[in-house]
Amino acid sequence: MSFAQQYPSHLLQQAVNEMSRLPGIGRKTALRLVLHMLRMDPNQVDSLANSLSQLVHEVRYCNVCHNISDVETCAICSDSRRDAALVCVVENVQDVMAIEQTQQYKGLYHVLGGVISPMDGIGPSNLEIQSLIDRVRAGGVREVILALSPTMEGDTTNFYIYRKLQDTGVDVTVIARGVAQNDELQYTDEVTLGRALVGRIPYTA
Amino acid sequence: MSFAQQYPSHLLQQAVNEMSRLPGIGRKTALRLVLHMLRMDPNQVDSLANSLSQLVHEVRYCNVCHNISDVETCAICSDSRRDAALVCVVENVQDVMAIEQTQQYKGLYHVLGGVISPMDGIGPSNLEIQSLIDRVRAGGVREVILALSPTMEGDTTNFYIYRKLQDTGVDVTVIARGVAQNDELQYTDEVTLGRALVGRIPYTA
């Protein structure tokens, strides 16, 4: 609809305005969600509202890996069974959760909080890159695994970090790029297929 | 992913749990929204949270049409330029907004709050049907326009209301069903096309 919607209530309009600020939530979706809340138990809506306010005011970040944490040093960083000499560099919280989900990784993390993206005005100083370098220079780290998204921004950030760590003597590795499980080879793009060939490894049965 | 996600923070998990109770918001979307809030100004998040709590606690419904309203009698019902003898029966707030948007209607509304749906346990007593009958019996209403969705539930509700109003002498009409603007005739379903033929009206240039 091309002209402004008339809301029957100011309170309703205000709630819709606020909800539609969230990414991917248009005004119609916001209205649908807000009207759904009117059919919910008001205590449940309060509980939702409080949990959001509480989160943004009380959120803490781990002083080692900068992941979201309830305590000063997060559960992963303070777990003595994990290999503290191995640091996996990721973009955000979701990436830590995705890697943990694989149950293939027993090292620690370093959460950058994004990738270098001049188009969005995000430079190295807006990310947790200096803290990564300081962490490596403090000693005890054997290998830094770069696990950023295989995009131009991810590649730029990988290169920047690699250059900054070059003289520390630490091993810098990058996660393998290749064909995804269950992908059909004929539909795999040429960059991915090329990288999969170049990055081939000895076959193990 | 098949097994439970490990959230790095209890506050984060709680906010995700609450958000994912909303319809159409899965856990991944909830996590994305909540992490976006962490990058917003905390005051904006408070403002969102407060607007939701305020809405559910302070919401009022018009004592005439039962639409959401900030005052006892809503702006539409108290507008003396509108035709109070014409009452359009709709399912919900969004339907009022959609009809207002057409700028074709100058009567009043009656918001049922749903339609009769035995499958969902919604009977006439869960809807604002008795208040509609009382409103008509109180006098001053010339025509009741049924504008419910053209579904089995809508049809059932239309029939129920029609029967209840039969002895009041008020005109009961139903909005036209036919081919939608810009629809191609060959792709229109047979029920709609049949109704469009039966419901034909004199051509006016």
Image: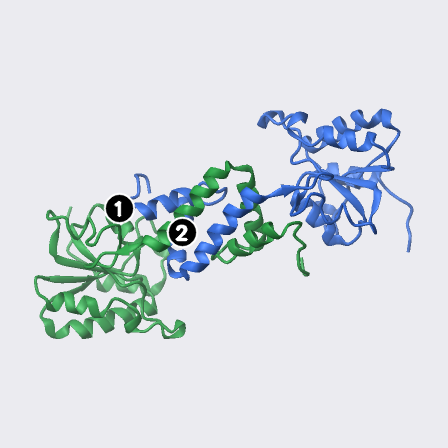
Chain colours: A green, B blue
Gap between marks 1 and 2 measured at Cα? 28 Å
Taking depth in this image into account, of A53 and B111 the one nearest to the observer is A53
Taking depth in this image into account, of A152 and B154 the one nearest to the observer is B154
Q: Which residue is mark 1?
A: A101
Q: Which residue is mark 2?
A: A53
Q: Amino acid at mark 1?
A: Gln
Q: Is residue B20 visible?
A: no
Q: Position of residue A9 (x, y in %)?
A: 64, 50
Which quarter of the image is occupied by the N terminus of chain A?
bottom right
Residue under the image location 15 percent in, 65 percent down: A135
Image quarter for residue A157? bottom left
Q: Residues within 10 Å of mark 1 (few under 14, many from 20)?
A: some
Count of number-bearing discs: 2
Q: Is residue A78 above or below residue A198?
A: above
**Residue B185 appears left or right of A195:** right
Q: Position of residue A111 (x, y in %)?
A: 25, 60
Residue under the image location 79 percent in, 25 percent down: B164
Taking depth in this image into account, of B78 and B40 the one nearest to the observer is B78
The kind of secondary structure element at disc 1 is: helix
**Residues at discs 1 and 2 both on one chain:** yes
Q: Position of residue A56 (x, y in %)?
A: 37, 55
Q: Residues within 10 Å of mark 2 (few under 14, many from 20)?
A: many
Q: Is residue B140 visible?
A: yes
The disc numbered 2 marks a residue on which chain? A
The kind of secondary structure element at disc 2 is: helix
Q: Position of residue B3 (x, y in %)?
A: 30, 39
The disc numbered 1 marks a residue on which chain? A
Q: Amino acid at mark 2?
A: Ser
**Residue B99 appears left or right of A118:** right
Q: Is residue A76 above or below residue B62?
A: below
Query: Residue B37 bears which disc, if any?
Result: none
